[in-house]
Image (cartoon, rainbow, N blue to C red):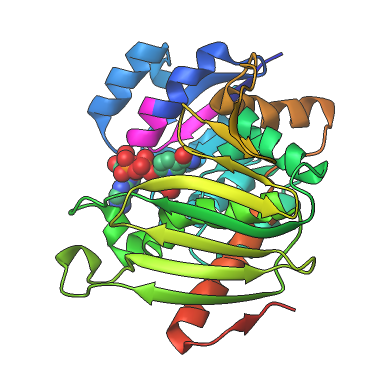
Amino acid sequence: RKLGYAIVGLGSYATRQIMPQFKNCEYARLVALVSGTPEKLERYGAEYGVPRTHRYSYADYDKLRNNPDIDVVYVVLPNSMHAEYSIRASRAGKHVMCEKPMAVSVAECQAMIEAARAANRKLMIGYRCHFEPHNLRSVELVKTGFVGRPTLITAEHGFFAQPGQWRLDRPMSGGGSLMDIGIYSLNAARYLAGEEPMELVATEYTDRTDPRFRNVEDRIDFQLKFPSGVIANCVSSYSSGHNAFRVTGTKGWVGMEPATSYEGQKLFTRTGGDTEQVSVSTPRKNQFVAQLDHLPESILTGIPLRASGEEGLRDMRLIEAIYRSARERRAVSLA
Ligand code: NAD
């Protein structure tokens, strides 16, 4: 059986990356659309066979409640809208998939978790890399001792932010590169370490004369100290392009570049003299399909939910601590 998704926000990520993937899903189908732009509803409704009865404006959002074909609401809106639209979906009795970052504050994340709990519905965050096979293989290699005892993780994520978009407007985005792309460095450091950091220190580098960065940060680097002793050095940037990580240990290293892109991941290892590229067999489901299928599969079969609201909350607590550390120019203890 396939559960029905409503997509909320027909922007770039929803229309170019997510919606084309439903045709390959085992447990998920696209049944409804929510947009403030009637032309988009018309165009994508026609393209995906979504009937007029299943196309909604934001004014009609709460009417999703009355549509039994909708099981899951997938929120793909600007960050500051995640909490409100996720909570309203939970209250409408729907399961929720929400894009990363989960919201723009710890308090919002907690309210989202509470709303889903009160409605007895599931809440999942769009951490697609948790379903990407090269990332999963990297985690497994580290876990099974391939690098020996891990001592250093590096994770770098950035892209060149173009002017004139909500990403650069703090009320809409909640922050700059860290909220958007640096969160991949943070989340990867955590899944590669397999534990939670106990202390962090962060430094921000932003040219405030650049009109793009009037109220959000450009570059913010942070160092996470984990209980096992491994240290993660992480980069988050809106003015340089990178997408890579590496775990170095007492016996060698495991690294990826690109690490978290939409496709084309490459995994490398080194234990002795040579760097080798590891081939990872192509799975039946790519990361997008696996992510879309996971929530309905969890609803239908009861398998434990990966990338839950609690996972999004963990990142948001660290994001708040990273901003605090950079602002106050001191290390922050996470105990
Ligand atoms: P986008 O600007 O392309 O799309 C945002 C959509 O929200 C647009 O359709 C816009 O019309 C709509 N919207 C509704 N109300 C709005 C308002 N008041 N102001 C601005 N837009 C409004 O952005 P996007 O790149 O699709 O990002 C959407 C979300 O998806 C973000 O939270 C982002 O972090 C996330 N995202 C995730 C990934 C990933 O790989 N998981 C990739 C890209 C984006």
Residue toward you, 188 or 107: 188
Q: Where does the image place residue 192, in percent across and percent down from the top left?
A: 68, 50
Q: Which residue shows up at 54% across the image and 48% down it?
A: 245
Q: Quadrant of the N terminus?
A: top right
- Residue 85 colored in magenta in the image: no
Residue toward you, 169 or 36: 169
- Residue 326 is left or right of residue 223, and the answer is left
Q: Where does the image place residue 90, in percent across and percent down from the top left?
A: 63, 46
Residue toward you, 216 or 71: 216
- Above or below, comparing residue 44 to residue 95 in the picture: above
- Residue 10 colored in magenta in the image: yes
- Residue 117 is left or right of residue 112, and the answer is right
What span is colored magenta in the figure? 5-16
- Residue 248 is left or right of residue 63, and the answer is right
Q: Where does the image place residue 12, in percent across and percent down from the top left?
A: 33, 35
Q: Where does the image place residue 272, in percent across and percent down from the top left?
A: 68, 40
In terms of image quadrants, where is residue 186? bottom right
Residue 76 makes an appearance in the image: no
Residue toward you, 23 or 7: 23
Q: Which residue shows up at 55% across the image and 36% down it?
A: 73
- Above or below, comparing residue 231 to residue 245 in the picture: below
Q: Quadrant of the C terminus?
A: bottom right
Q: Which residue shows up at 16% across the image and 68% down it?
A: 210
